[in-house]
Image (tube, rainbow, N blue to C red):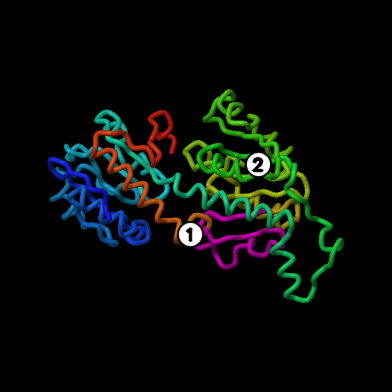
Amino acid sequence: MPMSTSYDKKKRILLDPAGRRMREIFSEEDIASLRAWFDVVWAKDEPIPLESFEREKQSLFAVVGCGWRFGAVDGMPALRAILDVGGGLPRPDTLDYETCFKRHIRVLTCAPAFGPMVAEMALAMALDCAREVSLGDRLFRSGEERYLHAGNTDTFTLFGRRVGFVGYGGLAQTLQPLLEPFRCPITVYDPWLTERHLRNAGVAPSSLDEVMSESDVIFVLAIPTSHNKAMVTRRHLEMIRPGRVFVLMSRAHVVDFDALTDLVLGGRFKAAVDVFPEEPLAKDHPIRRAESAVLSAHRAGAVKDDLRLIGRMVTDDLDAMNRGLPPHRMQNAEPELVFRL
């Protein structure tokens, strides 16, 4: 049952999560709460027609959606919040952030909801590569299995191994405690954060060259920006020591994917990949032939039961803002960073 909360007059909110389904991200309880607290507009799986939006926009207090497709916010005098349920923030070429910041319109993303799902998968895929679980399974099914020591010539355990993070945002910060039982020293390359901040977080700030050349397991966790396309170049990938593990979890945008494919096919190192330059990936893409790669079809953040956390975050933050309080569950767009997206 929704909380018993009364307001002088219900504010209007648009629920337009097209790209996701209402029941995928909202529980019955959360939908009931939102309807009790707000005058809810639309709340359907398909996108609201733009002509319908035009009729509603002047009275909207908040818009919940995937990205931003509604043009200028100037004609929305009541707007106080944009809550993105896609996993990132609306691109700066679609949303006028300067006006949003000037008018104190909150722009929020549900990205923190994906942290536990993706971090768990990143750890699983790293362990799979290091211990060659999937490769061993394939060999067993084809009758080519190698027992005991013969099956472990190229494996290693994660305990005490040097781990490198490329990027230290919410995903990396969620993965870090999962690595604590393995007692792994962690080095981080993240030009958006100060060295003092990283040291206070219990990780060692480092250059990208050092992360790539000195780590036993490298996790690529950086969000895509206008500054980091193919930031991890062929030169960086060639620094990875033989038999080590490279885990690509955030976006393929950050890596020279052709070089990654070439080097993994050549047996230079092992790789675990959940994201690709184009999805679905071409059936004849050469990385599909890489025996030393563990490949996943962008599944890390799409666990059915856990997606309801998105709706819980949206509901909690809308409740807070309705009461005149700041949101506390979703991630806020930062003026210093958002224009780099």
- Expressed as whole percent of the image width and height from the top left, the position of residue 16 reads 27, 54
Q: Amino acid at mark 2?
A: Glu
| Residue at the spot 30% in from the left edge and 60% down from the top edge | 28
Magenta stretch, main secondary structure, is loop
On screen, residue 334 above or below 141: above
Q: Is residue 108 left or right of residue 243?
A: left
Q: Amino acid at mark 1?
A: Val
Dot 2 or dot 1: first in sequence order is 2
Which disc number belongs to residue 303?
1
313 and 42: which is toward the camera: 313
- Expressed as whole percent of the image width and height from the top left, the position of residue 250 reads 53, 47
Q: Which residues are magenta?
A: 271-299
The answer to which image quadrant residue 135 occupies is: bottom right
- Element type where label 2 sits in the image: helix
| Residue at the spot 44% in from the left edge and 45% down from the top edge | 111
- Element type where label 1 sits in the image: loop
Which disc number belongs to residue 206?
none
Structural distance between the alpha carbons of marks 2 and 1: 24 Å
Q: Is residue 296 magenta?
A: yes
Which residue, given by chain and number where applicable, does mark 2 sit on? 180
254 and 181: which is toward the camera: 181
On screen, residue 197 above or below 157: above
Crowding at mark 2 (Cα within 10 Å: few <14, some 14-19, many 20+): few
Q: Is residue 56 left or right of residue 99?
A: left
Crowding at mark 1 (Cα within 10 Å: few <14, some 14-19, many 20+): few
Q: Is residue 272 left or right of residue 250?
A: right
| Residue at the spot 82% in from the left edge and 63% down from the top edge | 151
- Expressed as whole percent of the image width and height from the top left, the position of residue 53 reads 18, 52
- Count of numbered labels shown in the rendering: 2
Indicate the quadrant containing the N terminus: top left, top right, bottom left or bottom right.
bottom left
